[in-house]
Amino acid sequence: MIIISEVKQLPLWGKIIYGTGSGGFSLIDRVLITWLFYYYITSPLEGVEALMPPFAFGVIMFIGRAIDAVADPVIARWSDNHKSRMGRRMPFMLFSGVAYAAVFILLFYPPVAETSALNSVYLAVLLGIYFALFTAYVGPYLALLPELARSTKDRVDLATFRAVFMLLGVGIALIGSGMLIGTLGFHGMVWAMAGLGLVLLYLPLLIKEKDYADAKPATLSLIKAVTTTFKNKAFTVYLAGNVTFWLGFNIITLNLPLYVTILLGGTEDETSIYFGLAFVVALLFFPVVNIFSKKLGLKAVMMFALVAFMVLLPLFFFLGQPMIGLSPEVFGYIIMGLAGLPLAVIFIVPEAIVAEVSDLEENLSGQRREAMYFGAQGFILKLALGLSTIITGTLLQLFGSTAAQPLGIQLTGPVSALFILVGVVVFTRYPEKEVRAFERNRGTSSLSQ
């Protein structure tokens, strides 16, 4: 009998438990991304107009993202090179979870209930800490995926479980947050979401990492680890395409409450309906994405998602207007429902691609450094997300963010589509055949040993 590896294969319960971690940080982070901008620039506190101007918030968010971006490769290298009885990844997840949830709560308690420089300093400091703690959990967590699953098929399956819980976390955040604000108030919603997220964050620690992941600590220095990672052509092409997508999509995400409350004239809790449509459709299409990713390849499915978003996002300009005989509400429902199709892909495929291209590292350094690939992606991605906040703040500041002057909100759709167009062009160069050939050769080599 041929033994390919001494480590155990992760059972079904392990795949499910692993996925819950994604639900935890997705829930908390989505509440923050969706409501923190809204909270500070249109304060829902009684008698308070705003805690700061939109552009100031955008700049502070960019600074926080920059701090987070720097933390990504540092924590990734630390995790890749770490050695402990718990493994390379679990210690980071263990010690970051509680602090992460606590800082999330504190962000919604600014020191002054009015526009003030003190609020700006408070927000800047806490956002830097929040994003660093986010990275301390998420980076090692994502690095477990290619270690726990060692083939494209298994990685797509594990990424699907992760995506299911991510979608549930995001769905609870977007749908449930509006409802909870109506019943518990803004701060009650924040505490409830933090508590649920914390439980989900700690469930993956039930997996004994060393039983299922056969990985030796890496030895490269930080600079060497980063530069070697960016020598991986497949990774850099994927990264360029994925980052331009998230730059555009995050602009849309930041403005979702404004689409509903300003363009469509709805209330805060009505955002749940529009969010729910997109995420229910995405959940229904997870099995389809799983099947087609295995049959057609990850590149083809990712290209579909990028092109679909590129075509769909300019239509956000027309939200609130009667279109082709449809009421504004129905038109809004249709757009959000259609967005669920490519959204299903984005929840599953990118992490499977990173897991796939990280295997090529064996040709570059001869070491397994999965965390650095997710860390390098995080470094660039978070700078792009910070830039998207500045772009959003600038659009709203220059062109308007009110019912009387909504052009700034309307322009976010077409501007987002332009960024995704760049991603479409870049991702056509992703060398999927080369990546798959390496996986086949590695499998053949393992069988011959």
Image: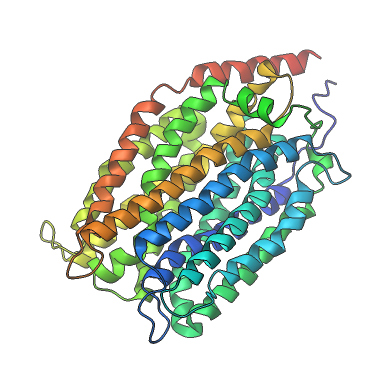
The C terminus is located in which quarter?
top right
The N terminus is located in which quarter?
top right
Q: Is residue 415 left or right of residue 253?
A: left
- Considering only vertical position in the picture, is 78 above or below 150? below
Q: Residue at x 79, y 41 (%)?
A: 88
Q: Is residue 164 left or right of residue 17?
A: left
Q: Is residue 287 visible?
A: no
Taking the view exactly as shown, the residue that stands out farthest to the front is: 117
Taking the view exactly as shown, the residue that stands out farthest to the bottom is: 47
Question: Residue 318: percent from the left, percent from the top?
Answer: 18, 56
Q: Residue at x 39, y 82 (%)?
A: 48
Q: How is the image coloured?
A: rainbow
Question: Residue 16: percent from the left, percent from the top?
Answer: 67, 52
Depth order, front residue of 1/394: 394
Q: Residue at x 69, y 44 (%)?
A: 140
Question: Residue 54: percent from the left, percent from the top?
Answer: 35, 63
Q: Is residue 312 left or right of residue 247?
A: left
Question: Residue 114: percent from the left, percent from the top?
Answer: 42, 78
Q: Residue at x 36, y 38 (%)?
A: 306
Taking the view exactly as shown, the residue that stands out farthest to the right is: 85
Which image quadrant is residue 409 in?
Answer: bottom left
Taking the view exactly as shown, the residue that stands out farthest to the left is: 325
- Considering only vertical position in the picture, is 82 above or below 254? above
Depth order, front residue of 261/390: 390
- Considering only vertical position in the picture, is 295 above or below 205? above
Which image quadrant is residue 95 in?
Answer: bottom right
- Considering only vertical position in the picture, is 360 above or below 344? above
Depth order, front residue of 188/306: 188
